[in-house]
Image (cartoon, grey):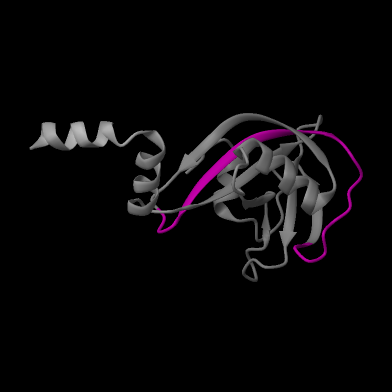
Amino acid sequence: MNDLVARLWRSIGGSMQWRLLWISEAKFMVGVTGIVRDGDGRVLLLRHRLWPEGRQWGLPTGCAKKRETFQDTVVREVREETGLKVRVGELVQLKSGYRLRVEVAYEAEFVGGTMKLDPREILEARWCTPDNLPEGTLEAHRLLIFGRAG
């Protein structure tokens, strides 16, 4: 029976295999975070309008779009939320286990631009030293800043 299933699977071809997998497998959102640092080692923190009161400070974060690499998501989200340009570095976290979400985080380096916040999403932005993070910084992001991804 297993040989028959394997032969059938191979006979239907790649595009049909992908369609069947798409229909049968779970779908996930991918949340992408950028740990943006400047030349002085400070990290970019944003006070997010839509996050829960008392936990609004965190790193630039957003969802990946179709056909977008996760690195491109970091670049886009930082640009949309702050107007700044970044160069994406090393992957520091790939985490699953959430209901319908996977989380990805990359180091990123500030390379230029002028701060211009998107008021629909961001209330305030600050460059902070890791030892002086604002009250209400999301704990998961605090861990990323210190290189202890959870």
Residue furthest toward the bottom?
53
Q: Can residue 130 be seen at all in this image of the molecule? A: no
Identify the residue at horizontal 51%, vertical 47% (top origin).
103
Relative image position of residue 22 (x, y in whole percent): 40, 49
The magenta segment is 98-122
Relative image position of residue 126 (x, y in whole percent): 81, 50
Q: Can residue 104 be seen at all in this image of the molecule? A: yes
Magenta stretch holds residue 114: yes
Residue furthest toward the right?
114
Magenta stretch holds residue 60: no
Relative image position of residue 107 (x, y in whole percent): 65, 34
Identify the residue at horizontal 81%, vertical 29% (top origin).
39
Which image quadrant for residue 57? bottom right
- Report the side of 89 relative to 25 (left or right): right
Identify the residue at horizontal 52%, vertical 38% (top origin).
93
Which image quadrant for residue 50? bottom right
Quick one: 124 or 9, which is closer to the camera? 9
Identify the residue at horizontal 41%, vertical 55% (top origin).
98
